[in-house]
Amino acid sequence: MDGGAWCARDISLRAQKKFLSRVGGAASARSLVLDEHAAKLLDQFLTVLRERVEKREAEKLVKHVIKAAVKLGVLRRHGQLSPADDRALDAFRSKFHTVLMAVVSFSEVEFSYDRGFLQDALRDSHQSLKSVVERHLSDKSVSRLAGIFALASRGDLLDSLFAGQIDEGVLKLTRMLRKELDKGWL
């Protein structure tokens, strides 16, 4: 709110962010804020994660991804992002696109897995997104974001996904990613 004055738009924005933080993980809420393709990708990602980390940790990660995406979408829709924020989000999209392309490549090309490259790309993606999240969202959201990237960058998790024989769940996820990348949706 500007200068302490009451502003319906700011109240509306805060209410939407609060609402979304409360329901971000619920299946019914996901259908309201995610398109069908994103929901299917996240569901498959959750399936793959559940096989490698504790069920609760996997579900929390996906819930936090949804919350962050939705909150940033609300900020963008309400014109709360500066041109610098938009550039940072564009940089994030570009860097995360590199992550997704690498993930697909690791499953399609034998012996191409490079843990260090993927960890560096995830770290760069995190830094791009963190600059926007720090300016607009709560410290709790910043912490959640750090948790998302910390888990996604864990060497043991990455190795279980791409080192050696790649299991069917990961292959299904990467085929889904490939399809979305080919369509230009990611």
Image (spheres, grey):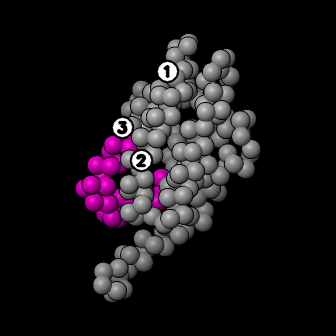
Question: Does residue 5 appear to the left or right of 176 in the view shown?
Answer: left
Tell me which segment is drawn in magenta.
69-94
Question: Does residue 185 appear to the left or right of 164 in the view shown?
Answer: left
Task: Provide the residue designation for mark 2.
Answer: 127
Task: Provide the residue designation for mark 3.
Answer: 94
Is residue 22 placed above or below 6 in the rendered structure?
above
Callout in the foreground (2, 3):
2
Task: Provide the residue designation for mark 1.
Answer: 105
Three-letter code for the amino acid on which mark 2 is drawn: Gln
Q: CA distance from mark 2 to mark 1?
A: 23 Å
Q: Quadrant of the N terminus?
A: bottom left
Sequence-earlier tag: 1 or 3: 3
- SS state under label 2: helix
Sequence-earlier tag: 2 or 3: 3
- Residue at (25, 56) in percent of width and height: 83
Location of residue 24 (image quadrant): bottom right
- Residue at (54, 20) in percent of width and height: 113
Q: Nearer the viewer, residue 84 or 7?
A: 84
Residue 119 visible in the displayed image: yes
Is residue 148 placed above or below 78 in the rendered structure?
above
Dot 1, how many residues are within 10 Å of its Cα: few (below 14), some (14-19), or many (20+)?
Answer: some
Image coordinates for residue 13, horizontal then vertical, percent: 42, 71
Q: CA distance from mark 1 to mark 3?
A: 16 Å
- SS state under label 1: helix
Secondary structure mostly seen in magenta is helix
Is residue 74 placed above or below 12 in the rendered structure?
above
